[in-house]
Amino acid sequence: MWANDQWRGSLFDAGCPASDFLAQYSRYFNAVEGNTTFYADPSAATVLRWQANADAGFRFTLKVPQQISHRLRGTERAAALAQWLDLLQPLRAQIGLCHLQLSAHYLATADADFPSLLQQLRSFSPVAVEVRHPALFTKGDAEQQLHQLLRQTECERVILDSRALFAQAPLSAALQDAQQKKPRLPVHVCALGHGPMFRFIGVSNLAANRPFYQPWLHKMAQWLDEGRTPYAFFHTEDNISAPLLARQFARELFELCGEDHPVLRPWPGDLAPSQNSLF
């Protein structure tokens, strides 16, 4: 996400209007995980506004609508996907990945039409598939078939790590809500192609995340050294501290391997004078 009122005075200027959120966000982050498309299609005018407000080097990772990923099948799904991709056409050059998140009840390898779905998506942009069916986390035949299919279609498998979230006692309403809604699945490290996608679901206590993401610093450094372009997205239970968590990770990655990132530049909140400053 890039639109959060509570980032004003930190990532955003204190008086930043909502219409400028994306422009200010893209000064410091070079990609975003766009979740709103999962629930509703943007208007054509909104797509054009996104295209105009983010610079050419910014990358959107947009989630395939749940109507397509969770409900429709066969020719109806293919037709709906074609319509959605046509809507996104003005943004195509700035789409880093299409994020296909599948239901925990959907065994992709048992759907004869699933390969054609991947091919249809892949003809538009790179694709990352997030699976949640338990059979795809056992390293058995189904998971091996999934990886073979993803390699054949040049798609990535989303890597999800929610251990930091579930390591915390649910002492706040936000933590209780997040632990009820977020998936708790084994962590399977899988970089199938050039652009692996990593999702880290942590907590607002930034220090509590460190033991869980430390191994990922080395994995990111390895992927970068191999010439890959990994996508890394960070969440907290209410996402208020998500930008700070991403920045903390980027700072430690820079210390480890010298990989610079625009998120390490001073934010508006860093530059704002404190109450005790002299003018």
Image (tube, grey):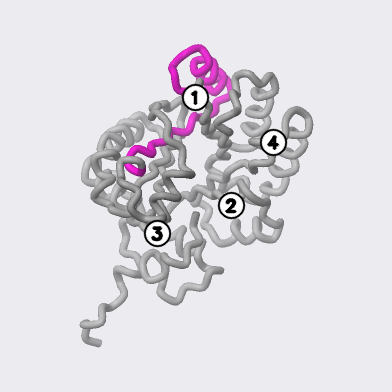
First in residue order: circle 3 vs circle 4? 4
Residues drawn in magenta: 137-165
Residue displayed at 33% across by 56% down: 244
First in residue order: circle 4 vs circle 1? 4
Q: Amino acid at mark 4?
A: Arg
- Residue lying furthest bottom: 279
Q: Which residue is mark 4?
A: 71
For label 3, count other residues whose C-alpha is less than 10 Å away and answer few (under 14), some (14-19) or many (20+).
Answer: some
First in residue order: circle 3 vs circle 2? 2
Query: For this rendering, which residue is in front, 132 or 245?
Result: 132
Q: Which residue is mark 3?
A: 240
Q: CA distance from mark 4 to mark 1?
A: 19 Å
Q: Which residue is mark 1?
A: 134
Query: For this rendering, which residue is in front, 81 or 209?
Result: 209
Between disc 4 and disc 2, the foreground one is 4
Q: CA distance from mark 4 to mark 2?
A: 17 Å
